[in-house]
Amino acid sequence: MRTRDHWITRAEQSADIATIREIDLAAFETPLEADLVDALRADPSWIHGLSIVSTDETGRLIGHALLTRCHVDDTPALCLAPVAVRPEHQSTGAGSAAVRAALSAAGEMGEHFVIVLGHPTYYPRFGFTRASAHGSGVSIDVPDEALMALTLDDAHPLPTGTVRYASPFGI
């Protein structure tokens, strides 16, 4: 699927795993975040079709976004894992294209909520707002502005409660 940017997005395929690992290792400061993405893919929280890659016009993988299952108390939600883009393509929209495609795929699958623990200047562009404004939080101490939530449809208001992540997050 061609995005509004110049990147092409599609669901991750098994042949992409080694390249995604390379992208993650190059994009993240430490291998721990790359290890987290690998662990999430291997965890039962992984949902086929919600791991999205962005490619250039030749098909070369440029970026990656992954949504996995989490819960707000007992309400199912999705969690956006760390988004990675090859360093030479950062700030070009490749990560945003993958995130937008993942959020769109989640909505098409009937998912209602997405939680992210991340950079408060990056995620609001997708519609994420502070989770605390909706009555949700986590069991660890994190800056209020770093935990954000998004509803994918207006028919389902964001749930309130404590966010429980997939076990690889360790939260």
Image (cartoon, rainbow, N blue to C red):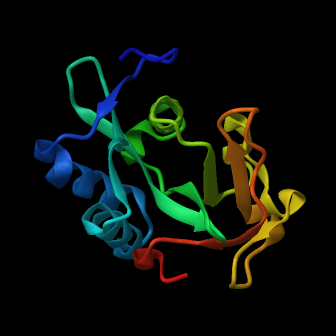
> Relative to 162, does residue 145 appear above or below in the rendering?
above
Quarter of the figure that contains the N terminus: top left
What is the x, y in percent for residue 107? 54, 33
**Could you tell me which quadrant the C terminus lies in?**
bottom right
Q: Position of residue 76 (x, y in %)?
A: 56, 58
Of residues 159 and 116, the one nearer the viewer is 159
The residue lying at 78 percent from left, 45 percent from top is 157
Which residue is at the front of the view, 93 or 35? Answer: 35
How many numbered callouts?
A: 0
Give me the residue at 71% from left, 53% from top.
149
- Report the front residue among 101 and 61: 101
Q: Is residue 101 left or right of residue 77?
A: left
Q: Residue at x 42, y 63 (%)?
A: 28
Query: 91 left or right of 166?
Result: right
In the rendered view, tell whether residue 37 sits above or below residue 143.
Answer: above
Task: Residue at the far right: name it.
Answer: 133
Picture quadrant where residue 33 is located = bottom left
Q: Residue at x 76, y 32 (%)?
A: 154
Q: Position of residue 148 (x, y in %)?
A: 72, 56
**Residue 133, image x, y percentages:** 89, 58
Farthest left residue in view: 15
Find residue 147 and report its image quarter.
Answer: bottom right
Q: Locate residue 146 relative to residue 10 in the image: left or right.
A: right
Q: Quadrant of residue 152?
A: top right
